[in-house]
Structures are given as C-alpha cells and as structure tokens.
Image (tube, rainbow, N blue to C red):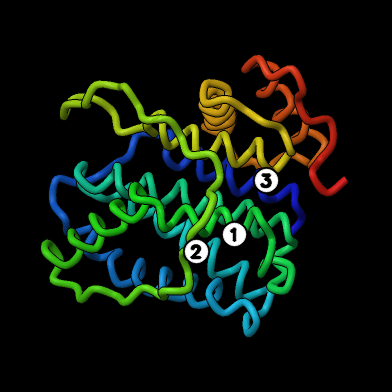
Amino acid sequence: MRKTSAIRVTASLVFAISVVACGSDTPAQACAQGPLFASARQRAERAVSELDGTTSIELEESVIAIADRVALMREVSPRSLRDPLGVLLAAYGQLVVALNDTGWDPASATNDPRVMSARAAFAEESVAAARTAVEDFLADQCELARGASDPNFALTGTTLPLPEGSEEPSRDATEDDGATASELQSFGFAIGDTYGVVLDATQAECIARALGVTYVDGSDSDIDDDEFLATVSAAFVQCGVTTPPTTAPDN
C-alpha cells in the first residue's frame, strides 16, 4: 500500500464516523459482530506485538481489518456503545496511518516513533476505558467471553496529539449519531501528521469534517492520486492552514 493510501484509509474512517449511524435499539446486531471484533482485535494485537515474526502482508491486513470491523460495529450498535467505539476507531485510525508511513515494514515499524506513539495511545485512559466499555457490553449483553489482550500491544510513552475534550451537549434520542469533535480531531491530527503539518484542534476537526463531506456521495478510489492530493490540499486551505501539503507524503 502506498503512503497516499494512508490518507485514503483515514478519509474512509472519517466518513464512517461522520455519517448518521443506523444503529439498533437492541444489542442483537452488535452481539453478532462481537466474535468477529474479538478475533480481529486479537489478530491485530498479535501482529503488532510480534513485529519480529510478522510479515508485511499480515501486519497490513490485520490492522486495517480491525479498523474496518470497529467502523462496521459502530454502525449497528446501540447508542450507548457508539461513543466508545468511536474512540477506538480514532485510535486504530492513527495506527493505520503510522504503520502505512513505514510501508507496513515490520522491521521499520519496530522503533518508528510514530508507530510507538500510536501504540502508546492504547494505554491512555480514554482509549483503555473505551475498550473496557465495549468488552463489558459484549460480556453483559451478549454473554461473550472476554478476550485476553496482548500486554505488549499498547506501549507506554508519548502519544500522538490527543484531541481536546468536547464541550458539546449530550445528544438526545432525536439527534443524529455523527462523529464527536474529539473523534474528528483525532483523525485530523492523523492526517496532518502524515503530511508533516502541525495542526491545532480547530484545524484538525475542520479538515476531518471537510474530507468526510467530500466523500459522502462516493469513494475516494474513484479519483487518482493527483486529484486526491488536490482535495486534501483544498481542505487544508479551507480550514485556514497556512502551509497546506503540496506533494504526497511518499514524493
């Protein structure tokens, strides 16, 4: 996967949490996703924790698979589960971007500071609490056994910029379930980090929203790399970034 594709993956995840989730008032659909989520999470944790024995293909497929699984699970879950799944989706999205920047090369990823930072995010209280909330739901509502986490997956240390807490009021049952400000900021920071552009929280949220709206009616795979870069650059300019990217990160 080329580095340009990292932004494509991130944009897809932004769209996944930006649209109104279908959801369900019952846990049935989320419970159906539970075993698949647990399997995908353990596979990704194993691949990332054992980089010296992981192939590039397995690393890429497993990490993208868990990000896709979390996005799908969020779409069909009850309202109470969507916020924690959104936090996990943001964390996995950052990991996708960081690993893609290494070319999904296990040897390079072992000591890569961005990969280490993305992995460290999983040890942060907000991400750990989100994972616990999902596991509690699956155990209590779906009677699924808790899957053991690999202790070597979540490194401790400095993380990528964490999003600022959202001051948005709580939504009631009549409102949509789009992404929170915190989730959008996480993806915006990941996009800026990939292009080497430092963003503040407002800019990060704005860029994530702009890209989410761009792909609401179609897929980013419908345009070539030059057109995609132009779209990303336009989002940066729209959001007041004075140094928008002019080349793809692998150029």
Residue at image point 11% right, 64% down: 140
Is 248 drawn above or below residue 156 in the view shown? Answer: above
Q: Kindly report the distance in space between the C-alpha atoms of the residues bearing marks 3 and 2.
A: 33 Å
**Image spot of residue 114 (x, y percent):** 64, 53
Q: Is residue 33 left or right of residue 172?
A: right
Question: Among all residues in the image, which is located at the extreme bottom?
Answer: 53
Q: Nearer the viewer, residue 218 or 125?
A: 125
Dot 2, crowdedness within 10 Å: few (<14), some or many (≥20)?
Answer: some
Residue 217 appears in the rendering = no
User: Circle 2 sits on which residue?
Assistant: 155
Instruction: Tell me the quarter of the image containing the N terminus.
Output: bottom right
Q: Nearer the viewer, residue 125 or 66?
A: 125
User: Circle 1 sits on which residue?
Assistant: 116
Q: Is residue 116 left or right of residue 28?
A: right
Dot 1, crowdedness within 10 Å: few (<14), some or many (≥20)?
Answer: many
User: Circle 3 sits on which residue?
Assistant: 221
Is 177 drawn above or below residue 58 in the view shown? Answer: above
Nearer the observer: mark 3 or 2; the answer is: 2
**Image spot of residue 40 (x, y percent):** 43, 70
